[in-house]
Protein backbone atom coordinates (compact mmCIF):
# COMPACT_ATOMS: atom_id res chain seq x y z
CA UNK A 1 0.00 0.00 0.00
CA UNK A 2 1.89 3.03 -1.31
CA UNK A 3 -0.18 5.64 0.42
CA UNK A 4 0.42 4.09 3.83
CA UNK A 5 4.11 3.59 3.04
CA UNK A 6 4.30 7.37 2.46
CA UNK A 7 2.40 8.06 5.67
CA UNK A 8 4.83 5.82 7.54
CA UNK A 9 7.92 7.56 6.17
CA UNK A 10 6.45 10.99 6.76
CA UNK A 11 5.48 10.18 10.36
CA UNK A 12 8.89 8.72 11.16
CA UNK A 13 10.44 11.94 9.86
CA UNK A 14 8.07 14.10 11.92
CA UNK A 15 8.77 12.15 15.12
CA UNK A 16 12.52 12.25 14.59
CA UNK A 17 12.23 16.01 14.14
CA UNK A 18 10.09 16.44 17.24
CA UNK A 19 12.08 14.36 19.70
CA UNK A 20 15.58 15.64 20.41
CA UNK A 21 18.50 13.15 20.47
CA UNK A 22 18.60 13.03 24.29
CA UNK A 23 14.85 13.02 24.84
CA UNK A 24 12.82 10.04 25.97
CA UNK A 25 9.23 9.13 25.21
CA UNK A 26 6.66 7.07 27.04
CA UNK A 27 3.78 5.23 25.48
CA UNK A 28 0.77 3.75 27.17
CA UNK A 29 -0.19 0.50 25.52
CA UNK A 30 -3.80 -0.53 25.91
CA UNK A 31 -3.52 -3.82 24.08
CA UNK A 32 -5.53 -2.42 21.22
CA UNK A 33 -4.69 -1.79 17.59
CA UNK A 34 -4.17 1.98 17.85
CA UNK A 35 -1.71 2.20 20.71
CA UNK A 36 0.19 -0.86 19.46
CA UNK A 37 0.61 0.59 15.97
CA UNK A 38 1.48 4.01 17.41
CA UNK A 39 4.13 2.46 19.68
CA UNK A 40 5.62 0.36 16.89
CA UNK A 41 5.81 3.44 14.68
CA UNK A 42 7.49 5.58 17.33
CA UNK A 43 9.84 2.71 18.14
CA UNK A 44 10.88 2.66 14.49
CA UNK A 45 11.67 6.37 14.70
CA UNK A 46 13.51 6.60 18.03
CA UNK A 47 14.33 3.01 19.08
CA UNK A 48 14.98 2.33 22.74
CA UNK A 49 14.27 5.89 23.80
CA UNK A 50 10.66 4.71 23.76
CA UNK A 51 9.39 3.24 27.04
CA UNK A 52 6.02 1.49 27.04
CA UNK A 53 3.69 0.99 29.96
CA UNK A 54 0.55 -1.13 30.26
CA UNK A 55 -1.82 -0.03 33.01
CA UNK A 56 -4.25 -2.44 34.62
CA UNK A 57 -6.96 0.01 35.67
CA UNK A 58 -9.28 -2.68 37.03
CA UNK A 59 -11.60 -2.02 34.09
CA UNK A 60 -10.15 -4.56 31.69
CA UNK A 61 -11.84 -7.55 30.13
CA UNK A 62 -11.48 -11.15 31.27
CA UNK A 63 -7.77 -12.13 31.53
CA UNK A 64 -6.88 -9.14 29.34
CA UNK A 65 -3.77 -8.18 31.27
CA UNK A 66 -2.25 -11.66 31.09
CA UNK A 67 -3.14 -12.04 27.43
CA UNK A 68 -1.80 -8.69 26.37
CA UNK A 69 1.43 -8.88 28.35
CA UNK A 70 2.27 -12.30 26.94
CA UNK A 71 1.63 -11.12 23.36
CA UNK A 72 3.75 -7.99 23.80
CA UNK A 73 6.58 -10.14 25.00
CA UNK A 74 6.39 -13.04 22.59
CA UNK A 75 5.20 -11.40 19.38
CA UNK A 76 5.90 -7.68 19.46
CA UNK A 77 9.27 -7.64 21.23
CA UNK A 78 8.47 -4.23 22.66
CA UNK A 79 9.71 -3.80 26.23
CA UNK A 80 6.65 -3.06 28.36
CA UNK A 81 6.29 -2.30 32.06
CA UNK A 82 3.04 -3.47 33.62
CA UNK A 83 1.54 -1.30 36.36
CA UNK A 84 -1.32 -2.64 38.47
CA UNK A 85 -3.35 0.42 39.42
CA UNK A 86 -6.75 -1.24 39.68
CA UNK A 87 -7.32 -0.26 43.30
CA UNK A 88 -6.36 3.34 42.64
CA UNK A 89 -8.82 3.64 39.74
CA UNK A 90 -11.69 1.84 41.42
CA UNK A 91 -11.33 3.89 44.60
CA UNK A 92 -11.63 7.08 42.60
CA UNK A 93 -14.69 5.76 40.75
CA UNK A 94 -16.61 4.81 43.89
CA UNK A 95 -20.08 6.35 43.81
CA UNK A 96 -19.55 8.04 40.43
CA UNK A 97 -22.48 7.58 38.07
CA UNK A 98 -22.08 10.26 35.42
CA UNK A 99 -20.41 8.90 32.25
CA UNK A 100 -18.42 12.05 31.46
CA UNK A 101 -17.30 12.28 35.08
CA UNK A 102 -16.06 8.69 34.86
CA UNK A 103 -14.09 9.55 31.72
CA UNK A 104 -12.54 12.60 33.37
CA UNK A 105 -11.52 10.67 36.47
CA UNK A 106 -10.06 7.83 34.44
CA UNK A 107 -8.20 10.22 32.12
CA UNK A 108 -6.78 12.00 35.14
CA UNK A 109 -5.64 8.79 36.85
CA UNK A 110 -3.95 7.62 33.66
CA UNK A 111 -2.01 10.86 33.49
CA UNK A 112 -0.98 10.58 37.16
CA UNK A 113 0.35 7.11 36.44
CA UNK A 114 2.20 8.23 33.33
CA UNK A 115 3.78 11.04 35.34
CA UNK A 116 4.83 8.55 38.05
CA UNK A 117 6.20 6.24 35.38
CA UNK A 118 8.18 9.15 33.89
CA UNK A 119 9.57 10.00 37.34
CA UNK A 120 10.63 6.38 37.88
CA UNK A 121 12.34 6.35 34.49
CA UNK A 122 14.17 9.56 35.32
CA UNK A 123 15.91 7.73 38.18
CA UNK A 124 17.19 5.13 35.76
CA UNK A 125 17.90 7.31 32.73
CA UNK A 126 18.97 10.49 34.47
CA UNK A 127 16.65 12.25 32.07
CA UNK A 128 12.90 12.65 32.45
CA UNK A 129 10.78 11.60 29.46
CA UNK A 130 9.18 14.62 27.83
CA UNK A 131 6.67 13.07 25.44
CA UNK A 132 3.64 10.80 25.68
CA UNK A 133 2.45 8.77 22.68
CA UNK A 134 -1.30 8.50 22.19
CA UNK A 135 -3.08 6.36 19.62
CA UNK A 136 -5.69 9.03 18.90
CA UNK A 137 -7.51 8.54 15.60
CA UNK A 138 -9.22 11.05 13.37
CA UNK A 139 -12.77 10.11 14.46
CA UNK A 140 -11.78 10.64 18.13
CA UNK A 141 -10.59 14.11 17.21
CA UNK A 142 -13.76 14.98 15.35
CA UNK A 143 -16.13 13.62 17.98
CA UNK A 144 -14.28 15.14 20.93
CA UNK A 145 -13.13 18.51 19.62
CA UNK A 146 -14.84 19.44 16.38
CA UNK A 147 -12.24 20.96 14.05
CA UNK A 148 -12.53 24.65 13.20
CA UNK A 149 -14.50 25.21 10.06
CA UNK A 150 -16.43 21.97 10.46
CA UNK A 151 -19.54 23.91 11.43
CA UNK A 152 -19.71 22.07 14.76
CA UNK A 153 -19.22 23.89 18.03
CA UNK A 154 -17.94 22.45 21.26
CA UNK A 155 -21.47 21.95 22.48
CA UNK A 156 -21.75 19.30 19.77
CA UNK A 157 -19.13 17.20 21.56
CA UNK A 158 -20.59 13.74 21.80
CA UNK A 159 -18.24 12.04 24.22
CA UNK A 160 -14.95 13.27 25.57
CA UNK A 161 -12.87 10.29 24.57
CA UNK A 162 -10.14 10.18 27.13
CA UNK A 163 -7.55 10.06 24.37
CA UNK A 164 -8.43 13.63 23.50
CA UNK A 165 -10.82 15.59 25.65
CA UNK A 166 -10.14 14.06 29.03
CA UNK A 167 -6.48 15.01 29.33
CA UNK A 168 -5.89 17.52 32.11
CA UNK A 169 -4.66 20.93 31.03
CA UNK A 170 -1.75 20.78 33.50
CA UNK A 171 -0.20 17.64 32.05
CA UNK A 172 3.55 18.09 31.80
CA UNK A 173 4.16 15.60 29.01
CA UNK A 174 3.90 16.78 25.42
CA UNK A 175 1.78 14.65 23.11
CA UNK A 176 2.83 12.64 20.09
CA UNK A 177 -0.26 11.51 18.18
CA UNK A 178 1.00 9.87 14.98
CA UNK A 179 -2.40 8.44 13.98
CA UNK A 180 -4.35 11.63 14.44
CA UNK A 181 -5.26 11.94 10.77
CA UNK A 182 -6.04 8.29 10.13
CA UNK A 183 -9.14 6.13 10.20
CA UNK A 184 -9.15 2.68 11.73
CA UNK A 185 -8.79 0.79 8.45
CA UNK A 186 -5.75 2.93 7.60
CA UNK A 187 -4.22 2.20 11.00
CA UNK A 188 -4.66 -1.51 10.33
CA UNK A 189 -2.87 -1.11 6.98
CA UNK A 190 -0.08 0.86 8.61
CA UNK A 191 0.26 -1.84 11.26
CA UNK A 192 0.52 -4.43 8.53
CA UNK A 193 3.47 -2.57 6.93
CA UNK A 194 5.05 -2.36 10.39
CA UNK A 195 4.70 -6.16 10.82
CA UNK A 196 2.34 -5.93 13.75
CA UNK A 197 0.85 -9.45 14.08
CA UNK A 198 -2.52 -9.98 12.43
CA UNK A 199 -4.05 -11.18 15.67
CA UNK A 200 -3.46 -7.68 17.03
CA UNK A 201 -4.61 -5.78 13.99
CA UNK A 202 -7.90 -7.62 13.89
CA UNK A 203 -8.85 -6.93 17.48
CA UNK A 204 -12.11 -5.10 17.97
CA UNK A 205 -11.74 -1.52 19.26
CA UNK A 206 -11.99 -1.19 23.04
CA UNK A 207 -12.64 2.16 24.70
CA UNK A 208 -9.95 3.73 26.89
CA UNK A 209 -12.26 3.94 29.93
CA UNK A 210 -12.82 0.21 29.46
CA UNK A 211 -15.63 -1.54 31.26
CA UNK A 212 -16.39 1.68 33.16
CA UNK A 213 -18.58 2.80 30.26
CA UNK A 214 -20.16 -0.66 30.01
CA UNK A 215 -21.32 -0.89 33.60
CA UNK A 216 -24.06 1.71 33.67
CA UNK A 217 -23.87 3.76 36.84
CA UNK A 218 -21.44 3.06 39.69
CA UNK A 219 -18.91 0.50 38.45
CA UNK A 220 -17.82 -0.45 41.94
CA UNK A 221 -21.25 -1.55 43.11
CA UNK A 222 -21.59 -5.27 43.96
CA UNK A 223 -19.81 -7.58 41.57
CA UNK A 224 -20.89 -5.81 38.39
CA UNK A 225 -17.43 -5.83 36.82
CA UNK A 226 -16.93 -9.52 37.52
CA UNK A 227 -20.33 -10.43 36.07
CA UNK A 228 -19.71 -8.28 33.02
CA UNK A 229 -16.32 -9.90 32.38
CA UNK A 230 -17.84 -13.36 32.41
CA UNK A 231 -20.77 -12.45 30.15
CA UNK A 232 -18.51 -10.60 27.73
CA UNK A 233 -16.07 -13.51 27.53
CA UNK A 234 -18.84 -16.01 26.75
CA UNK A 235 -20.24 -13.71 24.06
CA UNK A 236 -16.86 -13.03 22.41
CA UNK A 237 -15.79 -16.67 22.51
CA UNK A 238 -19.09 -17.70 20.91
CA UNK A 239 -18.56 -15.11 18.17
CA UNK A 240 -15.04 -16.44 17.55
CA UNK A 241 -16.19 -20.05 17.51
CA UNK A 242 -18.91 -19.18 15.00
CA UNK A 243 -16.27 -17.55 12.78
CA UNK A 244 -17.99 -14.16 12.98
CA UNK A 245 -15.34 -12.11 14.78
CA UNK A 246 -13.81 -10.53 11.67
CA UNK A 247 -17.19 -9.58 10.20
CA UNK A 248 -18.07 -7.56 13.29
CA UNK A 249 -16.64 -4.14 14.10
CA UNK A 250 -17.24 -4.40 17.80
CA UNK A 251 -19.12 -6.74 20.11
CA UNK A 252 -19.53 -6.51 23.85
CA UNK A 253 -21.84 -6.91 26.81
CA UNK A 254 -23.32 -4.16 28.96
CA UNK A 255 -24.19 -4.45 32.64
CA UNK A 256 -27.47 -2.75 33.48
CA UNK A 257 -28.17 -1.37 36.94
CA UNK A 258 -31.55 -3.07 37.11
CA UNK A 259 -32.69 -6.37 38.50
CA UNK A 260 -35.50 -8.45 37.14
CA UNK A 261 -37.48 -11.40 38.38
CA UNK A 262 -36.69 -14.82 37.00
CA UNK A 263 -37.02 -18.48 37.79
CA UNK A 264 -33.99 -20.73 37.85
CA UNK A 265 -34.08 -24.31 39.16
CA UNK A 266 -37.56 -23.93 40.73
CA UNK A 267 -36.38 -20.85 42.58
CA UNK A 268 -37.60 -17.33 42.14
CA UNK A 269 -34.63 -15.10 41.44
CA UNK A 270 -34.18 -11.35 41.49
CA UNK A 271 -31.01 -10.92 39.46
CA UNK A 272 -29.19 -8.76 36.98
CA UNK A 273 -30.02 -7.95 33.39
CA UNK A 274 -27.28 -7.71 30.79
CA UNK A 275 -27.39 -6.52 27.20
CA UNK A 276 -25.42 -7.78 24.22
CA UNK A 277 -24.37 -5.41 21.46
CA UNK A 278 -22.64 -6.17 18.17
CA UNK A 279 -22.24 -3.69 15.34
CA UNK A 280 -20.76 -3.25 11.92
CA UNK A 281 -19.12 0.04 11.02
CA UNK A 282 -16.56 1.69 8.79
CA UNK A 283 -15.04 4.07 11.30
CA UNK A 284 -17.15 4.05 14.47
CA UNK A 285 -18.84 7.33 13.48
CA UNK A 286 -21.97 5.54 12.29
CA UNK A 287 -22.89 1.92 12.91
CA UNK A 288 -25.47 -0.74 12.12
CA UNK A 289 -26.45 -3.46 14.54
CA UNK A 290 -25.26 -6.91 13.56
CA UNK A 291 -27.79 -9.59 12.67
CA UNK A 292 -27.10 -12.93 14.42
CA UNK A 293 -29.10 -15.98 13.46
CA UNK A 294 -31.51 -17.29 16.08
CA UNK A 295 -29.59 -20.45 16.85
CA UNK A 296 -26.51 -18.40 17.76
CA UNK A 297 -28.50 -16.16 20.07
CA UNK A 298 -30.35 -19.02 21.73
CA UNK A 299 -27.06 -20.79 22.51
CA UNK A 300 -25.32 -17.68 23.81
CA UNK A 301 -28.18 -16.68 26.09
CA UNK A 302 -28.43 -20.21 27.47
CA UNK A 303 -24.69 -20.32 28.10
CA UNK A 304 -24.75 -16.97 29.88
CA UNK A 305 -27.68 -17.81 32.16
CA UNK A 306 -26.28 -21.26 32.96
CA UNK A 307 -22.77 -20.09 33.72
CA UNK A 308 -22.89 -16.60 35.14
CA UNK A 309 -24.25 -16.40 38.65
CA UNK A 310 -26.41 -13.36 39.18
CA UNK A 311 -27.74 -13.00 35.64
CA UNK A 312 -31.26 -14.14 34.80
CA UNK A 313 -32.09 -12.04 31.76
CA UNK A 314 -30.26 -11.14 28.55
CA UNK A 315 -31.34 -8.49 26.04
CA UNK A 316 -29.92 -7.64 22.64
CA UNK A 317 -29.38 -4.05 21.61
CA UNK A 318 -30.61 -3.61 18.05
CA UNK A 319 -30.17 0.14 17.76
CA UNK A 320 -27.94 1.66 15.13
CA UNK A 321 -25.76 4.78 15.47
CA UNK A 322 -27.42 7.22 15.12
CA UNK A 323 -29.68 7.48 17.07
CA UNK A 324 -27.74 5.49 19.69
CA UNK A 325 -23.98 5.67 20.19
CA UNK A 326 -21.87 2.51 20.13
CA UNK A 327 -21.22 2.46 23.86
CA UNK A 328 -24.15 2.89 26.23
CA UNK A 329 -22.36 5.62 28.15
P1 LIG B 1 -19.47 5.94 20.63
O1 LIG B 1 -19.97 5.29 21.87
O2 LIG B 1 -18.94 7.33 20.84
O3 LIG B 1 -18.22 5.07 20.19
O4 LIG B 1 -20.43 5.85 19.49
C1 LIG B 1 -17.50 5.20 19.00
C2 LIG B 1 -16.23 4.40 19.16
O5 LIG B 1 -15.40 5.01 20.15
C3 LIG B 1 -15.19 4.12 21.25
N1 LIG B 1 -15.27 4.93 22.47
C4 LIG B 1 -14.20 5.35 23.15
N2 LIG B 1 -12.88 5.18 22.95
N3 LIG B 1 -12.42 6.46 24.86
C5 LIG B 1 -11.99 5.72 23.81
O6 LIG B 1 -10.79 5.56 23.67
C6 LIG B 1 -13.74 6.70 25.14
O7 LIG B 1 -14.09 7.38 26.10
C7 LIG B 1 -14.67 6.11 24.22
N4 LIG B 1 -16.02 6.13 24.15
C8 LIG B 1 -16.37 5.39 23.07
C9 LIG B 1 -16.28 3.07 21.14
O8 LIG B 1 -15.89 1.86 21.76
C10 LIG B 1 -16.47 2.98 19.64
O9 LIG B 1 -15.48 2.16 19.06
Image (cartoon, rainbow, N blue to C red):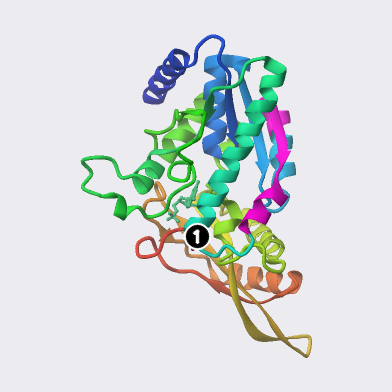
Query: How far across and down, in percent of the image, does residue 141 sit?
Result: 38, 41
The answer to whether 291 is drawn above or below residue 32 in the figure is below
Q: Is residue 47 left or right of residue 265?
A: left
Residue 269's quadrant in the figure? bottom right
Disc 1 is placed on an element classified as helix
Q: Is residue 204 visible?
A: no
Residue drawn at x 65%, y 33% is 116
Q: Quadrant of residue 49?
A: top right
- Is residue 304 among what the camera can see? yes
Q: Which class describes the residues within 10 Å of circle 1: few (<14), some (14-19), or many (20+)?
A: many
Residue 102, quarter of picture? bottom right
Q: Is residue 85 magenta?
A: yes
224 relative to 11 in the view: left or right: right
Which x, y percent locates residue 180?
A: 40, 33
Asked if the stretch drawn in magenta spans residue 79, the answer is yes
The front one of 202 and 92 is 92
Start and end of the magenta stretch? Answer: 72-93
Count of marks overlaid on the render: 1
Q: In terms of depth relative to the viewer, which is nearer, 262 or 162?
A: 162
Residue extending farthest top: 21
Looking at the picture, does residue 271 appear above or below residue 192?
below
- Which residue is label 1 attached to? 99
Amino acid sequence: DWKMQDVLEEEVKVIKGMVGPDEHVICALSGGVDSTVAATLVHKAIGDRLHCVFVDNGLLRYKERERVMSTFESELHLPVTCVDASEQFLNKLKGVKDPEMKRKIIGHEFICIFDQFATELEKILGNKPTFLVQGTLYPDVIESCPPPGSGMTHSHTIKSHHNVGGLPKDMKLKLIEPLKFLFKDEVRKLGCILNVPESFLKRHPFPGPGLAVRVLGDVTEGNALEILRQVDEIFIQAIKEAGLYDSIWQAFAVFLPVQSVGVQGDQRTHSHVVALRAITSEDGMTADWYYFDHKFLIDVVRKICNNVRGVNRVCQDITSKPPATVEWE
